[in-house]
Image (cartoon, grey):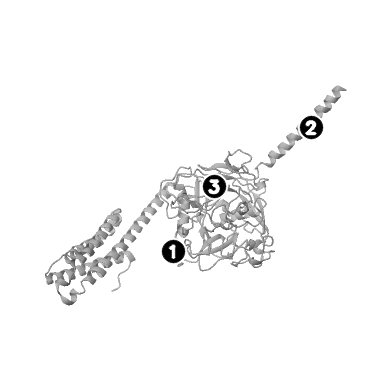
Amino acid sequence: MEKKKNKIIFGTLAIIIFLGIVIFSIKIISKSNISVNAPQLVDGMIPVKWNGSQWIETTTDDKEWYNYDNKEWANVKLADGSMFVWIPRYAYKITKGYHGEDLEYKKQSALTDSTKQGGIVDIVFLNGITNNTFDNKKIDSTNTNSKSDYVIHPAFKFGNEDLQGIWVSKYEASRQDATDTIQGNQEILSFKENKLSITNYDLNSAMYYCRDMERQDVFGWTKQVDKIASTGDIIDDSNNFDTHLMKNIEWGAVCYLAESKYGINKEIQGNASLISGKGGILSTTTGNETGIYDMAGQNAEFVSAYYNLGTDNQDLKKYTNAIKFDKKYVDIYNSYGTDNYGDCIYETSKDNFARRSWYEGQSDLSISYPFFLRGKSSYSNCIYSYSTTNGDKTNDYSEYKIGFRATIVLSTEVLSEEENQSKKEAIENENMQNIKTSNLNTLLNSLNSNYTNGYIDAMDLFTYTFQASSIDFTKLRTYYNNFKADYEKFKNNISQYEKLNNEMAEIITKTDEFLVEFDKATTKTDNVDTIINNYENSSDKWDKAYKLVYKALFNKELDT
């Protein structure tokens, strides 16, 4: 009897242990992340996870680092404390709300959160850089219509490279010395909570300083030491990643993941504060701490994209980074339509001149301005809002401020030795042309201000009286000294380039001749004939020098 009793007890314990193992195994399986590409780290990235009250460092093999099934996205910190979030490679299909279909739009003021409508996005994660899902279903790479079937999201293509995912900054860009009350003064970017974002950069600056991140060691990686070419490439770039201003399609990649079952899957609450992260977890893309903050509200945000309004458009001429940067850094639009996809523009809005984006976000592509703003408008704080701007930094009269954020991608695409040399020569030539233009402009202005509007005007009374006593030679000497100082700077600056020095040889010869006569004309004398002779000689030499400078600067003869 005792043996039978022991067997029963032993059997019961075995069942309990077995069930415990099963339950534990189920928990482990539920924590697995086999359905998404594992985050790819670059130097300086430290995996972190939310423990319920704070961010703590972890390791890449920690099963609790991320779980996209549970809306827990992978986060990392850089050495300076900046945070980035992993968006894994996926394909998407819009099953409701494509181009505003099957959605009801009303005036926003009459809507509540429960009546605003978004679309339905179905996402399948892709394996590695392939077009296959993790259960080996192949996605048609030629399909660009997300209403009819799955589309491989274009954000996972960088130049000619397919990407396993992208890193998007968790917060808007701020300065390294920013606080919650001041923007600070440093030019090096950071992406941290509880900071005032940079809102006094124009589009050129936003694009430049996001690329400049690779040239700084504060983030924990080995900085690149060479210059940034006009194409946005860093000369002799030796790392395996790329930092840049977030593109429109990258914004869209975050939006669709957020709208899917792997994200918040409803309207994101706008951050009404100007301080990063102050909107709380409902202002994130997941509805919890692991998501990306403030893409709805806080500030409107520049993205790297432009509407092609033609080569004569003054804003495109002014903010040339958008035009000159390699196209892997910029999204280009020629129309509002299906040519562009994955960006949450045409696919998520009924039209482009009202509040007809998902959740009543603004949908406005003005034909007056070429550059895109996302996330906030005069009418709404909505991740699906888009409008256009001239590229200027925030002005004092704007209804909202303009910030921006960065993206990091792993890129093994490097310039060849020949391409590096070509870029170096291009940078050198560009610098030379800039020095030429700025110094010719300074010289031309000095010829005007110190001779025409200085010496000639001061001699006006003498031309009527022909009395030496009417001349203030002290004032005349000031004009001469000012011009001589400007001219010496001109010669010193152009001497940096032998080619430029040779090109300016005739200008230097004629200006030297003018300077000799200008010296005589401003040297005190009581001899009226000498004064007249010096006046005429200096005027003649000035005329020759001025015409040469004008022609070199404007590439045309001076109309006389």
- Please, what secondary structure does the residue beneath circle 1 have? helix
Amino acid on which disc 1 is placed: Lys
Q: Which of the two marks, 1 or 2, is nearer to us in this view?
A: 2
- Label 3 close to label 2 by CB (< 8 Å): no
Quadrant housing residue 275: bottom right
**Amino acid carrying mark 2 in the image:** Ile
Q: Is residue 414 above or below residue 534?
A: above
Viewer-proximal residue among 424 and 377: 377
- Which residue is at a point 64% across and 61% down the rendered structure image? 359
Write the residue at 78% across / 30% down: 14
The quadrant in which residue 96 appears is: bottom right
Mark 2: few, some, or many residues within 10 Å (few <14, many ≥20)? few
Rendering quarter of residue 19 = top right
Q: Residue furthest right?
A: 1
Which residue does the numbered mark 2 point to in the structure image?
A: 15
Q: Earlier in the sequence, mark 1 or mark 3?
A: 3
Of labels 3 and 2, earlier in sequence is 2
Which residue in the protein does label 3 denote? 83
- The relative height of residue 68 versus residue 454 in the rendered view (above or below) is above
- Residue picked out by circle 1: 317
Disc 3 element: strand
